[in-house]
Image (cartoon, helix red, strand yellow):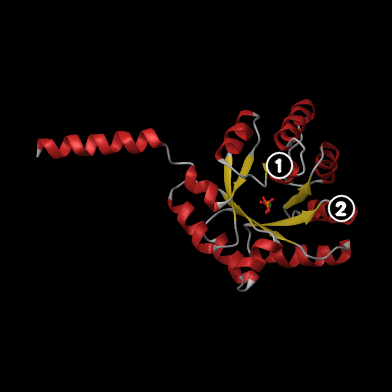
Amino acid sequence: MKYFIDTANVGEVEEVASWGVLDGVTTNPSLVAKEGGDFKETVLKMCELVNEVSAQVTATESDEMIKQAEEYSGWHKNVVVKVPMTIEGLKTIKYCKEKGIRTNCTLVFSANQAVLAAKAGASMISPFIGRLDDVGQDGMGLIAEIMTIWDNYDFDTEVLVASTRHPRHIVEAAELGAHICTIPFKVFEKLPKHQLTDIGLRKFLDDWDKVK
Ligand code: E4P
């Protein structure tokens, strides 16, 4: 399973990339607005650190979305254009597929949306599991549904589990065979930690001190 970081903060990307575990980045307009700075510059810095950086279009009509997709994909070979799951978004994904521009279909909340995006030619689809949980629906249940459909039909599109909120989400996504998880920095920081690791290391170091 590929690990992406869900952020527009270049420092966070640098940090997790230095652990040797990072495959990509997902940004979105809210994350970019939170960090400030120049969007293109941010994306380009990230493209030097990882191979897949999702940059989201902000237009809502396909002709404008396509213009943004062409612009973003021209910035760097590692840019993946993020397109929202709308009918206009599907038209944009179809165009990008024909032109060889990689896309990540975002804001996926149902299996029907997932299949439509895959059929239109999305390279990745992003079901938002945390936001489904927030409204009392079963986010991980959607991933299970999508992975079953993917097993039945062999879609090339990668399933990117988005809106993850805690370490169990990452494990459960892996158990279901999802291709990618995008993980906020705060959740990433929790993944290497275990209290027994800390206790064990302290004991090893204390015992070693006695030898000296
Ligand atoms: C994915 O690409 C999105 O940026 C992200 O995972 C949304 O997560 P949130 O629901 O925590 O905002």
- The residue furthest bottom is 38
- At mark 2, the secondary structure is loop
Q: Look at the numbered disc 1 and say if its residue's Cβ is closer than 8 Å to ligand 1.
A: no
Vertical position of residue 90 compared to residue 112: above or below: below
Q: Which percent across, then down, holds residue 107?
A: 77, 50
Say which residue appears at 70% left-offset and 65% top-offset.
72
Q: Nearer the viewer, mark 1 or mark 2?
A: 1
The span from disc 1 to disc 2 (Cα, nearest Å) is 18 Å
Q: Nearer the viewer, residue 14 or 137?
A: 137
Q: Residue at x 88, y 63 (%)?
A: 61
Task: Give the residue displayed 70% in from the left and 34% down from the top.
Answer: 140
Residue 96 lies left or right of residue 80; in this view the side is right
For disc 2, the marked residue is 86
For the N terminus, the image quarter is top right
Residue 73 in sight here: no
Looking at the rendered structure, the kind of residue marked 1 is: Ile
For label 2, being within 8 Å of ligand 1 is answered no
Q: Which mark is residue 129?
A: 1
Q: State left or right for residue 46 relative to residue 33.
A: left
Residue 43: image quadrant is bottom right
Quadrant for residue 135, please give it: top right
Please report contact status of discs 1 and 2: CB closer than 8 Å, yes or no. Answer: no
Task: Judge whether residue 197 can be spotted in this image.
Answer: yes
> How many marks on residues?
2
